[in-house]
Amino acid sequence: MKQFIQGIVGNNHQATHLLQILRQIQSRYHYIPEAAIEQLSGLLNIPRTQIIGVVEFYSFFHLTPRGQYELLISDSITDHMLGKKNLLDYLENKLGVAVGEVRADGVVSLDNTSCTGMCDQGPAGLVNGYALTRLDRSGIDKIAALINQQKPLSEWPSELFQVDDNIYKPGLLLNQQLEQGAALRAVLQRGIKETLTEIDKSGLRGRGGAGFKTAIKWQFCSEEQQAERYAVCNADEGEPGTFKDRVLLNALADQVFEGMTVCAAIIGAKQGFLYLRGEYLHLYDKLQNILDRRRRNGLLGSNILDAGWDFDIEICLGAGAYICGEESALIESLEGKAGIPRNRPPYPVTQGYLGKPTVVNNVETFLAAAGIAVNGGDWFAGIGTEKSKGTKILSISGDCARPGIYEYPFGVTIQTILHDCGADDVLGVQVGGPSGSFISDQEFERKLAFEDLATGGSFIIFNTSRNILDMVHNFTDFFAHESCGFCTPCRVGTSLLKKQMDKIVEGHGSAGDVVALEELCQLVKNYSHCGLGQTAANPILTTLERYPDLYQSRLKEISYEPGFDLDGALETARRMANRDDAGAHLAQIEANEHE
C-alpha cells in the first residue's frame, strides 16, 4: 500500500489532488484504509481529520470495506417508474446480499445511489463506477453469475455497459460540425476583444440554469488585475433527469474543449479544468484521448497554433456529491476539499480556484461559445425570444415513447415538446429537475424561456397513471440525502421535510401536518445558504399549489375543537416563516420531533 500511494502521489505533493488520489485508493482497495489516511497526511502535509472529512463528504468514498464489486442502483424517480424496486428485490435475492450491506465473503456490496445520468435508458446502476444501463431480470442474472464467478469487468459482455446518445431532435448546436481548431483560428483572425463582442451580441446566457450573461462573466474575469486565471467546465450534472452534458461530451467533446479554449483566450487563462461527475467514469479515457490528440495537433498546451498562446485542460473526476454542481462547491472540490458552497461575494470571477479569478460555465455553454466564435453572434441571436437567445438542449425522460436528447429554439411550447417525444395522456411535467417546477396539464401552452420556464435541461414527463406524491416523496428524499450539512436550515429542514412527507404519504398526516409542511418549506427556501436548500422545497410547493386535494386525500380524519381556524393557523405559519431566527426555530422543531 505504501508503494502504491507513493506512486500515485509521485513528486506532486499538492493537496489539490486529494480527490483524485482518494479515487484511486478507493478503486484499488474498495475503501480508504486508516493507514492510507496516515500516509497521505504526511505526504500532502494536511491534517488526517481533513482527509477523513473529505472521505465522509463524498458518497463514493468509504472508511470501511465495500465489496470487490461495488454495485449501486440508481434511485431516481425515472428508475422507479421503470420498475426499479422490484428489480432491486430480485437483485438482492440473486446476490444474497441486502441493500446497504457487504456480502459475508466480501465479494459484492449493494446499495442505492442518486441519479446516474442514464434516465433515458434505465433502470440504471454502477459497478465499480462504470455505468450499467437498461437493467432487467435477464441482465441481473448475467451480472450475478459474473460476480459469483469473480470475472473481471474487462470480461463482462459489452452490452451491459452500452450507453447510447439517443439524439432525436438536433438543432443549431447539435447539427454544427466544426472542423477541429476552427473556433481558435476564428479568434486569431477576428481578434480576442472582437470575439468577446460577438459573444455579447449573441445574447448567450449560462445554460446551467441560472442564466447569467456569458459575455459579462468573461469580461469581469478578464478585467481582474491578477495574472493567473482559470477556465472551468462544469460537467457535474447531478440534477435527476439531466443527461445532456453526458451526450455532448461523448459526441462533441472537441467543440466543448474548443469553447473552453476560446474562453481562456478572452480571460487570459493558461489552465483549465473539466470537472466530470463521478458517474461518468466511462467517458474519462475517451476524453483524455481527445485532449492528447488536441495537444499533438497544436490546439492545446504551449504555443497553440504557433500564436504564443498557452492553455491546457485537466480532467478532474467527482466522487458522488450533487452539491458540487454549484460553482463555488465545485471549486472547493477541485481544490481537494469537501464541496461546501462558499459565501458570496466574492464571486468566482474575482476569487475562484486557489483564490484566483475563475470562469465556471457548463458544457452546453462552452459548446455554444465555440459555434458563436466561428459563425458570429447574429447566427445565434437570430433565433429564440427577445430575452432568451438561441436554443436549449433538453434531456427528456419519463412517460414518453422516445426519451433522449432534443434541441429547441427558446420560445417553444411545452405542448410541442410533448408531441415530438411521443408523450400521451400527460398529467404533468417536472421542468428543471427536482429544483425546478412541476407544471400541470393546464399549462402546456407555456414556453421554454428564461422569462417563463427556465431550465438547466431536465424534462421529466408523468402520465395520468402516476401518483404525483410518489414523485414529491422521491425528490424530497433526494434533497435530504444530498444536503451538504453546512447550514441548519438546509441540514435540518430537508430532513424534516422528508419526515413530514413520509408521514403524509403513508396516510398518518393531519391538516396540521400540511400547515407545518408549508411552514418548513418557507423556512428552508428563505434561509438556506445555497441553491440546494433554496430550491429543495420546490417539489412540495409547486405540487401543493396545483393539487391541494391530492395532499388532502392522504390525511386521516381528525375532528377539531369548535371554532378552530385552519386558515388562521396557516397564516400564522406563513408569518413564522419570516422569522429572523429561522435556524434556531428549525432546531427547536427538530427537538420537538425527537420528544
Image (cartoon, helix red, strand yellow):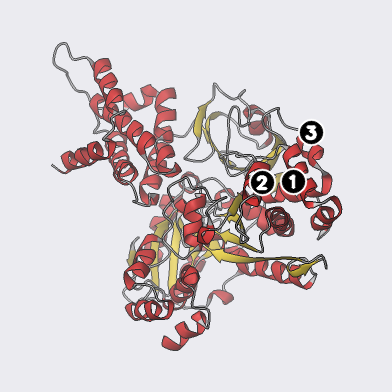
- The residue identified by callout 3 is 382
Q: Which of 377 and 97 is in front in this view?
A: 377
Q: Mark 3: which amino acid? A: Gly
Quadrant of the image for the N terminus?
Answer: bottom left
Q: Which mark is residue 219?
A: 2
Mark 3 / mark 1, whichever is N-terminal? 1
- For image coordinates 44% across by 65% down, the residue present is 71
Q: How far apart are labels 2 and 3 at the CA level?
A: 23 Å
Circle number at residue 468? none
**Residue 429 drawn above or below residue 118:** above
- Mark 1 vs mark 2: which is more N-terminal? 1
Please provide percent x and percent y for residue 544. Answer: 39, 27
Relative side of 363 to 505, left or right: right
Q: In this view, does 422 lie to the left or right of 33?
A: right
Which structural element holds mark 1?
Answer: helix
Residue under pointer 1: 196
Q: Which residue is at the front of the view, 372 or 197?
A: 197
Closer to viewer: mark 2 or mark 3: 2
Residues tagged 1 and 2 counted as in contact (Cβ below 8 A): yes
User: Please, which residue is most extreme toward the top here?
Assistant: 563
Label 3 packing within 10 angstroms: few (<14), some (14-19), many (20+): some
Instruction: Give the alpha-carbon distance from disc 1 to disc 2, as whole Å.
Output: 8 Å
Q: Are marks 3 and 1 in contact (CB under 8 Å)?
A: no
Identify the residue at image location x=65%, y=48%.
218
